[in-house]
Image (cartoon, helix red, strand yellow):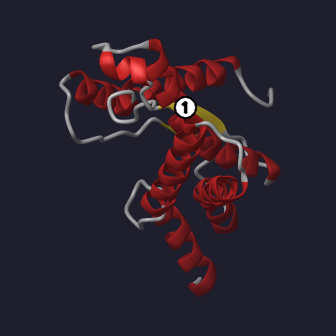
Amino acid sequence: MAFIELMEIVDLIVVTLALGYIFSAYIRKPKTELELVYPRFGLTWDEFKFAMMVTAPAVILHELAHKFVAIALGLTATFKAFYAGLGIGIFLRVISSPLIILAPGYVQIPPSTSNLAIFLTALSGPLTNLLIFFIAGYLLNNLRRMTRTQAVAIYMTKQINFFLFIFNMLPIPPLDGSKVFSSLFHLIFA
């Protein structure tokens, strides 16, 4: 089995593009003075690219952390785009909903996996978001020569990753937190 399959690469690309489209309504690149005077309407390539650059790494690195930890533990792990979840997100974007409901993808591992492997695999995604949150915070506090666009991108990256960490650690199925806490419970009390 290959480290990453062709279909996984296709799914990663689809998720990245869908996230760029969905979040282009909510995450905006800072406007220049010219854009403030002559506003453009509709989806622009810059808005799409900026939203994709800010959101996709948070989700993709989260899911790849699940995959690589599972592989390191000797499990087969496959990333899959959740097309129904992406469809809901795209539909909400099309109707200009102020609410975002999104489940872009998941990593599938064998069902007969040990509680320790489930715990480590499930925890790896949210911990990746927490790590990116701290890295972005460090960059914001220590980089002195940033453009306004770079500062906004790093700040939004920080906020999105913190939100994903908190959200994914909620002990509600099918979120990572439910797998982390239930497997931890079984490790301690079983």
Q: Where is the N terminus found, in terms of image quarters?
A: top right
Task: Report the residue at 19% width, 34% height from top.
Answer: 97
Viewed as shown, does residue 11 lie left or right of 178? right
Above or below residue 175? Residue 68 is above
x then y, percent, for residue 147: 61, 36
Task: Report the residue at 45% width, 35% height from top.
Answer: 104
Residue 108 visible in rendering: no
Helix, strand or loop at mark 1: strand
Q: Where is the C terminus found, in terms of image quarters?
A: bottom right
What kind of residue is marked 1? Lys
x then y, percent, for residue 57: 60, 37
Task: Report the residue at 72% width, 57% height from top.
Answer: 142
x then y, percent, for residue 51: 47, 30
Above or below residue 78? Residue 131 is below
Residue under pointer 1: 80
Mark 1 packing: few (<14 Cα in 10 Å), some, or many (20+)?
some
Residue 158 visible in rendering: yes
Task: Report the residue at 75% width, 45% height from top.
Answer: 68
Viewed as shown, does residue 136 lie left or right of 98? right
Q: Quadrant of residue 183?
A: bottom right
